[in-house]
Structures are given as C-alpha cells and as structure tokens.
Amino acid sequence: MAETTALTVDFQDQAYLASAAIRLERSNKQAEEFNVGYFRVHGREGHTLNSTSGSISIEDTNLRRFVSEFVYFNGERTASLGYPGALTVTIKPYGKFFTSSVGTAGGSGSGFKQSNNPGITYNAAKNALQAEQALYGVCLVEYKTPYDLYRATFGGKCPSVESTDPPADISIGSADDDKAYEGLDPMVIYAWKDGIVAASLAMDPPACKYEDQAYDYNAKSQMGAGDPRLTLEVDSEYPIRYIENGSNVLEAGCKIRLYPADSSAILTSSSGKLLSDKEEISVAVTEIVRFNNTSSVRLRYQPDNQQIAVSSIGSRFIDQWGSTFSPGLKTWGDTCKSVQWNSKHSYSNPITRDVDRDEIVATTGIASAINCYGAVEVSYTVKFSRRSFEFDFDSETGTFVPVAILAKAGTQSTSLNLNGPSSRGYG
C-alpha cells in the first residue's frame, strides 16, 4: 500500500479563466418537472449555447460545485481533472501505484513494477495531476469548480393514454417487446465559439407518467472508435457486489465483458484475480446515437453482422451551416463520399470509401458525408465473451483495492478501471 499523503493548493477565481475547457453536464440541483430539466455549464467564456430541439435559458450564475472524484493514471504522466477551473485542490493517492512497463501477461499484475513514491502534483495550467513518471494508479481528488445553471425545456408531448396494444406490425416483435417510443423529444445541447463546437451534452427528457414507456437514453452512451476495436465493461447481470463464501473473509467481485468475443485479446489486471470461466454470448442491442457536429458516429459495440436497423426518434437534424435537413444514414455494407466542403453548395476532393463495421454516416442526397447535429435509434446484434473477476482486499485499510483491467490484441488495447464496494459498516 503506497503511503497516503494529501496536497492542498489554493487559487483565486483567475484559475477559472485560465482553464480554457468548457463542460456541459446535467444537474440535480433542482427537481425536474414534466418537460423541464437542468444542466450546468462549467468554464463558459464567450461561448454560444444552442439545442437541437426544445429551448434553453439561464437559471442562475456564479455557483460553486464541490467535486470528489477518482482520477486514474493509465500509463501516462498526466491525468486530467473532470472539471475546469479547479479551486482549492486536495490530492490523496489511493492504493498502489505501478510503472507503465508492462511485460507479457501471465497472471494478475504480471510485468508491473510497484512505485512507492509516485511524486504526484497538481498542474494548474493543464488543470491536471502530474507524476514524475508514467504510472498506473488512482488518486482521490477534491476541489471546487465554478458553473452557471441552465434550464432546458423539452419539446414534444407525452401520450394522454397509456397504450397496451402489441406492435401493429407483428414482424418487428411480439407483445413482450418494448412499445414504440412516445414522449418528449430528447435534445443535444452544444456550445460553440468562433465557429467551433467546444462541448456538447445529450439530454433525455423526464419520463412520462407511464414508467414502462420511459426511454433510458443515458444507458445508451457512445464509446470510441477503431477497427478492430476492443471494449471492456462490467456485465449488467453480474455487477460489482459482495461474494458469499461461508467464512468471515470479506470478498467481492463481478463479471467482465470483452467485445468482440472472437478477439485474441489477452487480459491482465493490476490487482485482484481474473478467473478462467470464459463463455461467449450473443445479444440484441438498441441504442441512441447522436451526431455532435460530426458526419460519422461510432456504435457502442461492433455489430456481429450487417443486419443494422436505423430509425427516427423525432429529432430534427441541423447541418454545419445551421439549416434543418433530412440526411441519408449509411451503415456497414454501404459506401459514402468523404469530401471537403467549401460552402453549403460546393465541395472538393471527394473520396469514395466503405462505411466501417461500427459506423453510422450522415450524408446528403448524393451520399456526401456532412457534419451535423441530431439523433437516431440503431438496433443490431453483438457477441461478447464473459469472465469473472475477484477484488483484492487490503486488511490494513479495510478497503477493496482499486484495479485497472487491461486487454490487448495486436496493436489494439483498452483498459477498465474498477473500485470495489464500500466495506464500511459491512456485517
């Protein structure tokens, strides 16, 4: 266990202006009502705010939010704080630290060299933690961040009567399936300055009074790109929890999903134990993908086949010049043209290419990719492998040891950071 120390740095409000980043985030400061939600704007300085539907307005200004977050070093010397303009920063190294020299996988933590003095400080200019060398490890960071509070009013309307009918077209499912979505319009809020979009926020509306018709947009977030692309996540059916072992020894674990299932990835962990109970599972996925001033978005996972269905959710699309339009939406198996737009009606350097396996491309009527804002629903099938993981328990501190799980296949790699359940008051 690395020695725990704390560093506190005090700044005036100039630190707010020194951090150029802007962040939009949903707020729970006020209770949401019918068609109204709230969001915070951190680090706004001359940015213009707009939304793809509904309307937004200022609610309160010059507020402060206390932040307590885990900041992870993933083989780098710096690790950014989650919010800009940090004031009164306290750093607490948490658990063990390892250098980034990773050898061949052969067991939990193989190839890692422990660092007992990571030398971590706060860099105000970068709004980030900085270490003396590249590390794997975790810090608990506490600070205050300034923000303005905004009100978002959603368009659309909820159905007046709950529908209990099965789908009109039985070929799309049975009466056991979800009903077609009816309700308020989701929106994408974006902040732009000097013609550049600096941040965006996808907001789902408050649920209609019929809970079974509420759509969980937050559960359908996007992830990064790459081909092939590895994805690690905790299995929703076996989340992080205590393990009953019939003894007084405290144990906790979960199951880990690796996408795609047929990858040759090798898994290793900085602590704990990955079990050898691997199994492969195929599931249907439905997610909302959002275009945030891009012509292309990545699906959360790579589809297992080309049976990809794209459908409208009522969101209007706005092109890069601010005009409403109806895009063509290309998927795996289609082709599109990547172009350089000179103006709204002129482009150059067209290059025809195949749409990637996990990609949705928005195009004009002549199949030219175009940056835009909007959202659609996508349904497809994925296959993943699943393995069990068990946390190490530090009896000295009475806590489960945080872990970085690493997956690597060829030139592709990814990691997943996990914290065990709290052991306070257990038993």
Image (cartoon, rainbow, N blue to C red):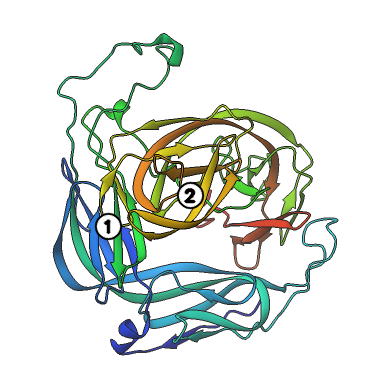
Which of the two residues, 140 or 24, is positioned nearer the viewer here?
24
Q: Which mark is residue 27?
A: 1
Q: Is residue 173 visible?
A: no
Residue at left offset 27%, top offset 66%? 41
Residue at left offset 52%, top offset 80%? 129
Label 2 neighbour load within 10 Å: few <14, some 14-19, many 20+: many
Q: Is residue 154 visible?
A: yes
Is 9 displayed left or right of 79 in the figure? left
Label 1 neighbour load within 10 Å: few <14, some 14-19, many 20+: some
Q: Amino acid under label 2?
A: Ser
Question: Which numbered disc, 1 or 2, marks the residue closer to the eye?
Answer: 2
Task: Kindly indicate the quadrant of the structure image that contains residue 125.
Answer: bottom left
Check if mark 1's residue and mark 2's residue have beta carbons within 8 Å: no
The residue labelled by disc 2 is: 296
In the rendered image, residue 80, in percent from the top left (x then y), is placed at: 50, 74
Is 284 displayed left or right of 117 in the figure? left
Check disc 1 and report its element: helix, strand or loop.
Answer: loop
Which of the two residues, 193 or 237, is positioned nearer the viewer here?
193
Check disc 2 and report its element: helix, strand or loop.
Answer: strand
Residue at left offset 51%, top offset 83%? 6
In the rendered image, residue 73, in percent from the top left (x then y), is placed at: 60, 71
- Spatial separation of the CA atoms under disc 1 and disc 2: 28 Å
Task: Kindly indicate the quadrant of the structure image that contains residue 24.
Answer: bottom left
Q: Amino acid under label 1?
A: Ser
Above or below, 414 against 218 in this view is: below
Question: Image quadrant for the N terminus?
Answer: bottom right
In the rendered image, residue 225, in percent from the top left (x then y), is placed at: 58, 53
Which of the two residues, 315 or 349, is positioned nearer the viewer here?
349
